[in-house]
Amino acid sequence: MSRSPDTLALPPPPPPASSQNVIVALSGSRKNKNVVTWALEKFAPEGNVGFKLLHIHPRITSVPTPMGNAIPISEVRDDVVTAYKQEILWQSEEMLDPFKKMFERRKVAVEVLVLESDNVAAAIAEEVARNSVERLVIG
């Protein structure tokens, strides 16, 4: 197949020189929808913005039993602890899914990050420092 002389194959545009990083830290509250809406309206129109949805849940130190008790993870088989941690991670991602879809509907890229920490403020600060975040929205 030959090309016509006036057709040029252009290389893709270079990546933007610098992009702003925005972390939207969310709890399990229903008010998170307003927080995400505000962040999208405030920062997405600027373009060249990388969003991260961040949720922090408490460090897992025990596994619940069907009887309503909790067994320390040191006394539970590794596979049970792993399965429980995966379940908690899945629940967190499910909680964040409607907010992720809000970004997708506006065709804005977003990364979902779920962390485990007993100190929410310290975990957020660490994530901000690690990713050179310029904007932090807390919901």
Image (cartoon, helix red, strand yellow):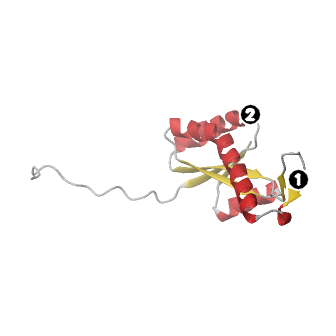
Q: Amino acid at mark 2?
A: Lys
Q: Residue at x 70, y 56 (%)?
A: 83
| Label 2 packing within 10 angstroms: few (<14), some (14-19), many (20+) | few
The residue tagged 2 is: 31
Observer able to see residue 41: yes
Q: Residue at x 70, y 50 (%)?
A: 87
Q: Quadrant of residue 71?
A: bottom right
Mark 1–mark 2 Cα distance, whole angstroms, equals 30 Å
Q: Residue at x 60, y 54 (%)?
A: 21
Tag 1, which secondary structure? strand
| Label 1 packing within 10 angstroms: few (<14), some (14-19), many (20+) | few
Horizontal and vertical percent for residue 127? 69, 60
Front residue (pair 14, 65): 65
Observer able to see residue 125: no
Q: Is residue 67 left or right of residue 39?
A: right
Q: Amino acid at mark 1?
A: Ala
Q: Quadrant of residue 29?
A: top right
Tag 2, which secondary structure? loop
Which quadrant of the rendered structure holds the C terminus?
top right
Circle nearer the viewer, 1 or 2: 1
Q: Mark 1 or mark 2: name the one nearer the start of the chain.
A: 2
Horizontal and vertical percent for residue 126? 73, 62
Q: Residue at x 65, y 36 (%)?
A: 38
Horizontal and vertical percent for residue 42? 61, 39
The residue tagged 1 is: 70
Front residue (pair 24, 28): 28
Residue 87: assigned label: none
**Residue 127, placed above or below residue 104:** below
Horizontal and vertical percent for residue 97? 62, 40
